[in-house]
Amino acid sequence: MSSPYVDPFDGVESSEPAAKSKRPSKETIPLSFHIQWPLMQIGNALSGMVNGYKRLFKMSDSDLKAMYLKQAKSMNQKGDTKKCVEFLENVVRIDNRDADIIYRLGVAYEKNGQPDSAIKAYKKVISLAPDNAKAHYRKAVLLIKKQDYENALTDLEEAIQEKPDSAELNFRLGQVNDRLKNYDKAIEYFTRAVELNPQFLAAFKNMALTYDSLNDHEGSLKCLKRALEIEERN
């Protein structure tokens, strides 16, 4: 009679002899394991995403601003103005008191063909920083395109106080005053613009038209002659 067989794993005596080792067949792996394995993989992936979001949510506002600004700059360099706008909007949601960032958002809106949104952004900048000449100027140019000359004039008069020696601002003031039929005032600003920039072609052309409105044909002819000289030189 054979001696009792002892299973080394459970210590329970058995009268059965040890079975020959045999490679388990696929059928010995529970079906539930085959089903659960992909779910386990998906669960691990989701866990990684959740941990990533947790790290993101732990970022400080300043870190988030820096991250979004970096992405906005990258999108701007790539010419993707839509994405640039989206990232800058994220920055403004974090801090809606940063006049410089809101100004950049206004410029991005312009590039993305959203003039009304740009005007709104520049208004916000001006409410935070009333002496921001750039915001007044860009808002005024957009208002000129909308033929809202009265409000454009107000913004330009604010801007010129900060930048009195800007040929561009003097030119725009001449342009707006001409549209409002303030012809003498327009001539003053156009004259100042060409004094600051003697090669200012658009200023000479516009001034010629204003002189013509005043029936000063000699003055108009002089401006046209000067404009022609600049064009030939360039």
Image (tube, rainbow, N blue to C red):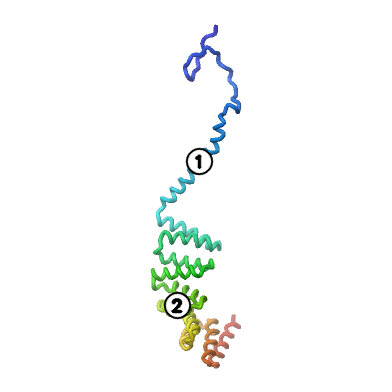
Q: Indicate the secondary structure of the residue bearing disc 1.
A: helix
Q: Is residue 112 above or below residue 59?
A: below
Spatial distance from mark 2 to mark 1, Cα to Cα? Answer: 59 Å
Mark 1 crowd level (few <14, some 14–19, many ≥20, 10 Å Cα): few
Where is residue 192? Give x, y as percent.
47, 84
Kindly identify the residue that appears in the image at 53 percent across and 91 percent down.
Answer: 219
Kindly identify the residue that appears in the image at 52 percent across and 9 percent down.
Answer: 3
Mark nearer the N terminus (2 vs 1): 1
Q: Indicate the secondary structure of the residue bearing disc 2.
A: helix
Where is residue 47? Give x, y as percent.
48, 43
Q: How many marks?
A: 2
* Residue 43, disc: 1
Q: Where's the N terminus, which quadrant?
A: top right
Q: Where's the C terminus, which quadrant?
A: bottom right
Image-quadrant location for residue 18: top right
Frontmost residue, 177 versus 195: 177
The amino acid marked with disc number 2 is: Asn
* Residue 151, disc: 2
Where is residue 80? Give x, y as percent.
55, 62
